Image (tube, rainbow, N blue to C red):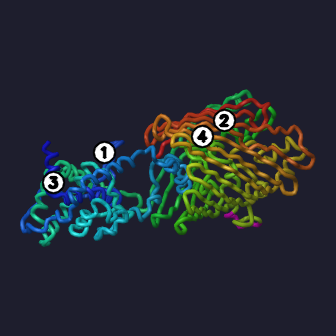
Amino acid sequence: MKRSKISRNILLTSPAIFSGILLIFSSVVATAQETQSIAVSSDANTSISVTPVELLPSVSTAQVPENNSVATAALSIQQKEHVEQPFQQSFANTNSTDLPIETAQKSSEEQIEETGIPTGEIITPYSEVETSQNDPLDQVTNVSQLSDVRPTDWAYEALRSLVERYGCIAGYPDGTFRGNRAMTRYEFAAGLNACLQQVERLTQTGSQGLLTKADLETLQRLVDEFRSELTVLGTRVDTLEGRVAFLEDHQFSTTTKLVGEAIFGVADAFGDDIDGQVNTVLHDRVRLNFLTSFSGKDQLQIRLQAGNATPLLARAGVTLQDGSSGTQEGRFTYDGDANNNVFIDILRYRFPLGKTATVQILANNALHHYYADTVNPYLEGLAGGENAISRFAERNPIYRIGPFGAGAALAIKPSNNLRVDLGYISNTASNPGSDNGLFNGNYSGIAQVVLGNRFKIGFTYVHAYDDGSNTDGDGANRFALGGTGTAFANLNPAQLARVTNLPASVLSRPVVSNSYGIQTSLGFSPKFLINGWVGLTEARLIGLGDADIWNFAVGFVFPDLGKKGNIAAIVAGAEPTLRGLNVPGGTRNFNRDFAYHIEGFYKFKVNKNISITPGVIWLTSPNQNDSNSDAIIGTIRTTFIF
C-alpha cells in the first residue's frame, strides 16, 4: 500500500514529472538497448541489457528556487481518461499471432539469400544490423525531432517540457519515440536514473529557473521507491564493465563475425536392388562462415568447408535391377565427399545499390539460389542442416543448372510484393584458355520475377551452356542438375548409351539448355504453408538431338510444430526425369517413368544451438524405371549452430 500511495501522491502533486518520466523511459531504455547495451547471459536462457549509469542515492535541494514549477508544463488532470489508451494499444499490439507471415518466413527467404547461412541459425550476421540502426542519436533538443510525436498527442506538452528544459530524452535510433511501449520496473528505474543524472548536472551548474524544490522532492520520492532496482542496475553495470573490457581485449575482429555449422549424420538405404551395396554410415560436414561488414550495409562472406558425406546411391558400385547406375536421386543437402579436406567453398561480396537493389559479386562456387528467391520457405536451406533433408526438397532443381561458378547478380525489390532477380555465373571464369573464361566458356544466366508476399508466385527462366566433355582438359563441366534427378535426366553419356544406339563418346558433347519454372508458396497461417513448383528443361545436345526434362513437387510445411523452431514437412513429387529424347538412331528400352520422390522429416530444436532431424526418403522408380525396386533412405541428422 505504501508504494501505491506514493505513486498516487506523485501523480497528483507533480503530474508533469510523473507522466513525462513515464514517457521517456521507453526512449531511454531503447537507446540503452539499441545503441549502448551489452547482452550478458547469466545462464542459457537469460539475457540482461542495461545502460551504464552512476546511481544517485539522494538529490540535494540546495540553491534551487521555489518558483517556476514543472507543473506548468503538465497535462490537465481532466485528460486522465486519455492516459490509459496508449497502454491498451501497446498490449494489443504485442500479440505474436497477429504478425504477418512474412516475419516467420524471413529466415528462409531473406536471411539465406542475404547471408548464405542456413535457415534457423540463431546468430544474427553482422551485416544484417545496419549502421543507421546502431549509431546513437544526438541528444534530442526539440520534440519535433521525434517523428512519431504530434502536438495532438495526450502527453505532448509534458514531453516537450522534458526535452526543452531538462534534456534527458533520447529517441530510438530510427528517430521515433514509441510512447505506447509497455515497460518493466527495471526499465522505469533506468529512465529515472537518467533523469536524475541530468538533474544533478543542472544543480551542479547552478542552472536557474529550471528546477524547483517541489520537483526535486518528487524525484527523491521516486528514488526512494525504486532504490532496490537502482541498486541492482549499479551492480549489473559493474559486472558489464568488466566483461566489456575482457571482450575488447580478446575480440577476434571489430568487423568480422564467425557463424558456424557442424552436421553429424547417420544414414542408410534399403531396397531389394541395393541391399548389400549400401551400408550404414556416420558422416559429417562442417562450415565456418566469416562475415565481414565494412559499412554496416555490405557483407563479405568467406566460407570454409570440410566434409566426408559420400552419396549413398550416386556413386560407383551401386547398380539397379535394370543395370543402370549413377542416379542422383535422394541425395542429402550436405553430401559430397571431400575426405574432410578444408577448402574455400564460397567467396562473395554484396552491397546495396540505392534503396531497392542489392548487387553481389561472386568469386567462387556460385549457385543461382544463393541470390535468387526460390519461393520455398522453411524447406530452402542452402545445403545446410536446418531445413529439408534432401537436395530435391530444397528447391526447383533448375536453380542448380550451371553450378559452382563465378559471376554477378542483381536483386531488385521495389516493394514487398515484387522482386526481380538477375544473375550470371560461369564455372570456367578462372580459366584464361581457349573457349573458356568468364564469357567464352560455360555459363548460366537467370531471370526471375516473384510476385506477392504471404501468397507468392515466381516465374523463372534459366539459360545455360555446358561444354559437355570433361575429358579435354579444360576443366569445364558437363550438363548437370546439381545432384538431383536420374542419371538420364543429367544426360549422363554412359547411361544414355544404354538406351540409344550411340556410344558414350558421341553422346558426350556440349549442351545448351532453356529451363522454365513456376514456384509458389501459400502461407495460410504462420503454422501452415503449402509450397510447390514445376520445372521444364529443354536441352539440345549440339549437333545431335534434343531432350525434355521435367520435375515437379508439392510440400506441406508445419513450422513450430510442438515447439518454436521445430519444422515438420512432407514433400512429394518427381525428381528431374528425362521424358523425351530425340537422337539419331532413336532409343531402345528407354523408360520414361517419373522418378517419384516422397520425403518426410521432423526437425526438433533441442535448444537454440542444437537440432535433431529424423527423416525418410522413398524413391518409387529409381532411375525412372518402375521395374527397379523401391529404395528407402533413412537418416538422423544432428546439427550444431555456433
In the current view of this chain or complex, which residue is farthest to the top?
272
Please say if 225 is above or below 427. Answer: above
Q: Nearer the viewer, mark 3 or mark 2?
A: 3
**Residue 10: mark:** 3
- Quadrant housing the N terminus: top left
From the top left corner, tell me how far across and down residue 521 is, in percent. 61, 47
To which residue does mark 2 refer? 598
Mark positioned earlier in the residue sequence (2 or 1):
1
Q: Nearer the viewer, mark 1 or mark 3?
A: 3
- Whether residue 325 sits left or right of residue 363 in the image: it is right
Q: Secondary structure at mark 2?
A: strand
Question: Does the magenta-highlighted stretch encompass residue 431?
Answer: yes
Question: Does the magenta-highlighted stretch encompass residue 508?
Answer: no
Q: Quadrant of residue 210?
A: bottom left
Residue at 87%, 47% (x, y): give it. Answer: 503
Contact, mark 3 vs mark 4 (Cβ under 8 Å)? no
> Foreground residue, 274 or 534?
534
**Residue 389: mark:** 4
Q: Secondary structure at mark 1?
A: strand
CA–CA distance in space, label 3 to label 4: 61 Å
